[in-house]
Amino acid sequence: MAIVHPFRALRPQPVRVADVAAVPYDVVSRDEARALVANNPYSLLHVTRPDANLPDDTPPEAELQYQTARANLERLIREAPLLTDEEAGFFVYRLVMAGRAQTGIVGVCAVDDYDREVIRKHEKTRPDKEDDRTRHLLALGVHTEPVFLVYRDVPALEALVEQTCSGVPLYDFTAEDGIQHTVWRMADADQVRMAFADVPTLYVADGHHRSASASRARAVWRAQDPHPSAEAPYNFFLAVLFPAGQLRILPYNRVVSDLNGYAPTDFIAALQARFEPRPATPTPAAEGDFSVYCAGRWHSFRFRPAEDGDILTRLDVSRLQTQVLEPLLGIGDPRTDKRLDFVGGIRGTAELERRVNAGQAAVAFSLYPTSLEALLAVADRGEVMPPKSTWFEPKLRSGLLMYAVQG
């Protein structure tokens, strides 16, 4: 059963929360991060994306990256300032996007649950990103960004959330992208903890690298601890836990830098020879359809059925890999091939067109979203999807509530 505990939050004062709160580190480029922090000394992006404060030629793996992150966090604690709650607690965090609400519980989850698959994954991590987040966490000693977890709906937890939301919020603001963020402190931590004890499984929706880094950093801290304890703060990581029924998944699209020797007309001809054509549209209308932008035009097709009918091989992201990317474009490992890049669905198909038209990519692929049911089914079988199979929206803001594991 899931172990979810209250925690003493490191957090901004209400008057400063909108300035501190930031988009997740991995949804913006360095240039986008620089633009966001340019006139805001309190943005958590100074901490989560220290490269926004460093010269362009600073290597991403340089120790200066992590020293800068630590220095920026210490400055933020002094100057924002950030405060630490005297008592541990749970929180409710609601996001409202275009009139649609998504409400979760903020607590800390056990690294042991992650290691023994009570918290299940659906994607493999990229080694370079996992290394980066582990070093970042070890340098800070603070979980600055929560992992986005999912559980199958539990009426007892929903009742506690509804009761909490009837009270006065701790924070309530609307970010520049129009998404409203509201946070309440929950009244009875014991009730919340006991309700989660009846939840058999949690699932990582977003934050595979953060949860993996929590496990790796815990191993380092525990080895350094002369008196390790099961209740030591480093045995837990920060998470927001949402009921599955509230979640929305957008597609995670792909762009490829070259056509593996094909001329654009020849590449499209190769697709036409292999796949059933569909009415051309940037956005696929149904599962099994995919759209291709190349040489200024959209083309739409339908994948061939998966040979074995297995749920994993039926995924559109899997079929794109096995039927197009590998055999035609020579992309054998989507985790490591630098010719392949991923574009979150929130950026829309216009971003795919922009990249191809600007010469940043030779071809773009627009996919139908992976279903949440498929995600849970794959995770329950102990299997993993291809990288970047799901894009959850709205994204959690970082910096509302943080969790310090080291002084």
Image: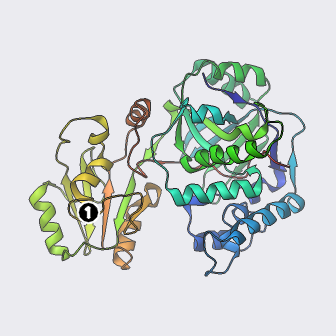
Query: Do we see residue 65 in this rendering?
Result: yes
Report x, y in % for residue 52.
66, 72
Q: Name the foreground residue: 118 vs 368.
A: 118
**What quarter of the picture does the N terminus occupy?**
top right
> What residue lies at 79% left-to-right and 60% top-to-bottom?
73
Q: Position of residue 219 (x, y in %)?
A: 68, 44
Q: Residue at x 69, y 77 (%)?
A: 54
Pinpoint residue 112: horizontal percent, then vertical percent.
64, 33
The residue shown at (83%, 36%) is: 227
> Dot 1 corresponds to which residue?
292
Q: Is residue 132 left or right of residue 343?
A: right
Count of all numbered marks drawn on residues in the image: 1
* Residue 16 location, quadrant: bottom right
The quadrant in which residue 288 appears is top left
Q: Where residue 159 sits in the image (x, y, percent)?
A: 65, 21
Label 1 residue SS = strand
Q: Nearer the viewer, residue 396 or 316?
A: 316
Colour basis:
rainbow
Q: Amino acid at mark 1?
A: Val
